Image (cartoon, coloured by chain):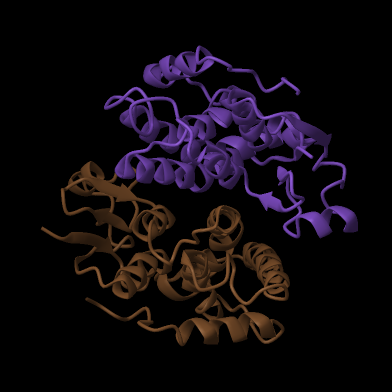
Chain colours: A purple, B brown
C-alpha cells in the first residue's frame, strides 16, 4: 500500500502535497478530482471528505487526511522541511495559517474566478475583484516585509511554509496580480524553483 | 520575563490562547488591543505584527508569534493538549486549518457584524448574511458528522483542535446561528465547559 492523493492538477492547494511528496521521495498514486464538475460533491467523495474539498490524502493504512497545510505538517514531521527549532517551527505554523486566512482566500480565489471557472471573469463584479486585489496585495506586502528580514519564511532554510506560500504566489498573475513591485518575492520564487527536487504545478507522479 | 498577549477580550481568536495558557498554568500579561478602534493599525502595532491583527503573543525572550492556531500548536507541543500519536496529531492540524478556512470566516464574521461592529447589523445586506449562514451551517454539519464518530476532534481527549473550534462555536448564536439542530455539537460544548481549568471568554489573567 502507498499514499493516494485526490487532487485537481491546477489547484495550488493540491500542488503543495504533490511537491512535498516528490521532494521527500514518497511514492503516491494520483486520483484526478475536479471540484468544478461536481466530483467533490458526490456521496462517494463526501464519504471520504465530508467537507467536499480537494486535496484529500489517503494514507497507506487507509486513514484519511484533509487540508493541504495539515498534509504538509504531517508529511514534514521529522524531516528538514519542518524546522527542528521550536520557535522556527512556531513561525512555520504562523505562516501556514497566514497563507490559509490572509493569502489564499484572495490570491487563489481571484485566480480561480479569472482563469479556472468557466465564465468566471464575466460574472466577477469590478467591486468584488477590487476587494480581492486590495486584500491580496496586503498579503503580498506582509510577505515582502518578511523577506527583508530573512531569505525563507521559517528558520534557516526552505520549509513547508515556503511550499504553502509558493503554491499560489507563483501563479498570482493568473488572478491579475502584478508582482513587479515585490522584488524580494520574485527573488524568493526563484530560490524555491532552484531547490533540489523542485517540480512545477503540472508535474504528475 | 513572562508571556504577553495582545488581545481583544471579545474575540474568539484571542480567547483561544487565553484559555490554553490558563489550562497549562502559564502566567501571562494581557494588553487590551481593540481591532475596531484602529489600535491594530498604528505604526507601533504594525511593527509588532505586520499583518495588523490580534492576537499577538510575545514570548518571554521577546520574540513574537501571530496567528491564534499557531499559538495553540506552539504552546501545546509536548503537553497532553496536542496528541502524541502521529495520525491524531495530523487530525489536530486538519481541524485547526478547517477552523480558520471553513468555519471562522463565516461564523465569527457573522458574529462580528451582528454583535460587535457598531452599526454592523444595519449595514449587513440580507444576501451577504444568507451566504455567511449557508457556509457557516455547512461547517457545523461537518462538525456534527465528526462528533458522531468520536467525542473529541483529534485523538482520545480534549486537544487544541477542540479549543480552536469551541472559540466561535459556543458563541455562534451571536451571529444568529441556531445550534438546536446540532445535538452532538451542544453535547460537545458541554463536555468542553466541564474540562478542568475551563474558563469563559470573559476571563482575564
Task: Residue B34 in the image: state x and y as whole percent.
Answer: 28, 64
Residue toward you, B124 or A203: A203
Residue toward you, A91 or A173: A91
Residue toward you, A48 or B32: A48
Question: Is B204 situated above or below A13?
Answer: below
* Quarter of the image where one finds residue A16: top right
Task: Residue A39 in the image: state x and y as whole percent.
Answer: 87, 46
Task: Residue B188 in the image: state x and y as whole percent.
Answer: 58, 81
Q: Is residue B35 left or right of residue A36?
A: left
Question: Is B57 situated above or below A71?
Answer: below
Q: Residue at x 72, y 29 (%)?
A: A27
Q: Is residue B50 visible?
A: no
Q: Is residue B56 left or right of residue B185?
A: left
Task: Residue A116 in the image: state x and y as whole percent.
Answer: 75, 32
Q: Is residue B165 visible?
A: yes
Residue toward you, A198 or B115: A198
| Quarter of the image that includes the C terminus of chain A | top right
* Quarter of the image where one finds residue B25: bottom left
* Quarter of the image where one finds residue A83: top left
Residue placed furthest toward the left: B1
Amino acid at each position: 500500500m502507498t499514499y493516494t492523493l485526490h487532487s485537481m492538477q491546477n489547484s495550488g492547494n493540491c500542488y503543495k502535497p504533490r511537491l512535498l511528496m516528490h521532494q521527500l521521495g514518497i511514492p503516491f498514486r494520483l486520483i484526478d478530482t475536479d471540484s468544478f464538475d461536481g466530483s467533490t460533491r458526490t456521496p462517494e467523495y463526501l464519504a471520504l471528505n465530508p467537507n467536499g474539498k480537494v486535496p484529500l490524502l489517503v494514507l497507506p493504512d487507509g486513514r484519511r487526511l484533509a487540508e493541504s497545510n495539515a498534509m504538509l505538517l504531517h508529511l514534514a514531521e521529522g524531516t528538514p522541511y519542518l524546522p527542528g527549532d521550536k520557535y522556527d517551527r512556531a513561525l512555520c505554523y504562523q505562516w501556514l495559517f497566514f497563507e490559509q486566512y490572509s493569502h489564499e482566500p484572495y490570491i487563489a480565489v481571484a485566480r480561480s474566478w479569472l482563469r479556472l471557472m468557466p465564465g468566471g471573469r464575466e460574472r466577477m463584479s469590478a467591486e468584488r475583484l477590487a476587494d480581492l486585489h486590495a486584500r491580496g496585495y496586503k498579503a503580498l506586502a506582509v510577505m515582502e516585509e518578511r523577506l527583508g528580514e530573512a531569505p525563507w519564511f521559517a528558520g534557516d532554510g526552505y520549509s513547508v511554509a515556503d511550499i504553502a506560500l509558493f503554491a499560489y504566489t507563483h501563479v498570482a498573475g493568473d488572478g491579475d496580480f502584478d508582482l513587479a513591485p515585490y522584488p524580494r518575492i520574485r527573488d524568493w520564487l526563484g530560490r524555491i524553483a532552484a531547490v533540489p527536487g523542485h517540480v512545477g504545478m503540472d508535474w504528475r507522479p
